[in-house]
Image (cartoon, helix red, strand yellow):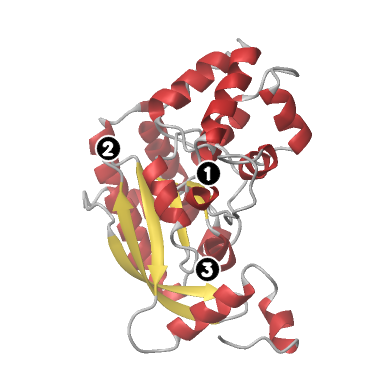
Amino acid sequence: MDLAAFGEFLRSRRDRIHPGEVGLPESPRRRVPGLRRDEVAVLAGASVDYYNQLEQGRGAQPSEQMVAALARALRLTEDERAHLYFLAGRPLPPRHGLSAHVHPGMLDLLDRLPATPAAVITDLHATLVQNRLATALLGPIPKEKGIEAGFVYRWFTDPEARLRYHPDEHDHQSRVFVADLRAVSARRGGDSEVRELIQRLVSASSEFADLWAHQEVAVRRADRKRLVHPDLGVIELNCLSLLSEDGSQRLLWFTAPVGGDSAEKLKLLAVLGSQDVGAAKQSGATLG
């Protein structure tokens, strides 16, 4: 590892990013051409002191998780990310899973959807990053790691994973998840991660085993969902997907269909964010 070169590379990448590119306010009084150190620290989920040490080439070797977070915060390309891992003395993670590199173009699109619930997920439906409204709509990103982090796994093994979906939607969502997983398995060539996931689901869920035996296959690109918000009740939404070139990641975003009250509920969600909706209603919050 080369911490001095690691810090120098961080500085060079920080200087080239305009605040508006990562959803931060721009000001004519800024003293630096790009991001400030404290801004990168916030984007990466690190303390300012720790990030300062990294740029100065001091401190302990950064973890793989921190290197991944910095690569996302600085919108690094795949080659730049690989270089950052090399300088940190860390092995480059696989293309799939929670350590996968979020495509900078998808992050850019996510930043441009502040008024729409949106997230970037893996092909096994593990959330990599989501905006404030997605957190308010769907809850925080789960803390599970590995296969357990994928929503398709939790859908068939954890009853709580279905609480945000209207009960009438459960059978449909199960079929869609299984058909999509079969398409992912074929595209990946049945790699070890997908094989293990399928084996564990067949053993853990008779529902999954029955659906898997039907051999249905269909990439999930769009769907209509009825989500159950703990304060706003049922919200009917269109869920749209934009797939990366290799299909390993997807940008999801939710829009209200024409008619009904879903658009008004999304407006309220936008006003309140992840605050307690019930308390906000009592305090007099109204739709803008």
The disc labelled 2 sits on which kind of residue? Asp
Secondary structure beneath label 2: loop
Residue most toward the top? Answer: 1
Image coordinates for residue 269, horizontal then vertical, percent = 56, 75
Position of the N terminus, as image quadrant, is top right
Residue 169 in the image: state x and y as whole percent: 39, 71
Q: Is residue 174 above or below residue 37?
A: below
Q: Name the residue that disc number 2 marks.
A: 246
Q: Disc 1 or disc 2, which is closer to the eye?
A: 2
Label annotation for residue 149: 1
Write down the quadrant of residue 275 in the picture.
Answer: bottom right
Which residue appears at 37% of the width and 45% of the height?
A: 105
In the image shown, does 214 or 226 lie closer to the viewer? 226
Which is nearer the N-term, disc 1 or disc 3? 1
Above/below status of 142 relative to 71: below
Q: Residues within 10 Å of mark 1 (few under 14, many from 20)?
A: many
Give the residue at x 74% y 88%.
282
Q: Is residue 276 left or right of residue 73?
A: right
What is the spatial separation of the Cα atoms under label 3 and label 2, in whole angstroms? 29 Å
**Label 1 secondary element:** helix
Numbered badge on residue 164: 3
Q: Is residue 183 left or right of residue 111?
A: left
Q: Is residue 97 left or right of residue 65?
A: left
- Quarter containing the C terminus: bottom right
Residue 58 place in picture, x, y as percent: 74, 17
Give the camera-side residue of 97 and 206: 97
Kind of residue sitting beneath label 3: Arg
Instruction: Please indicate, yes or no, whether residue 41 appears anywhere in the rendered image.
Output: yes
Identified at 43% across, 44% down, the residue is 201
Task: List the single residue furthest toward the right.
Answer: 49
First reached walking from the N terminus: tag 1 or tag 2: 1
User: Are there few (<14), some (14-19), or many (20+) residues within 10 Å of tag 3?
Assistant: some
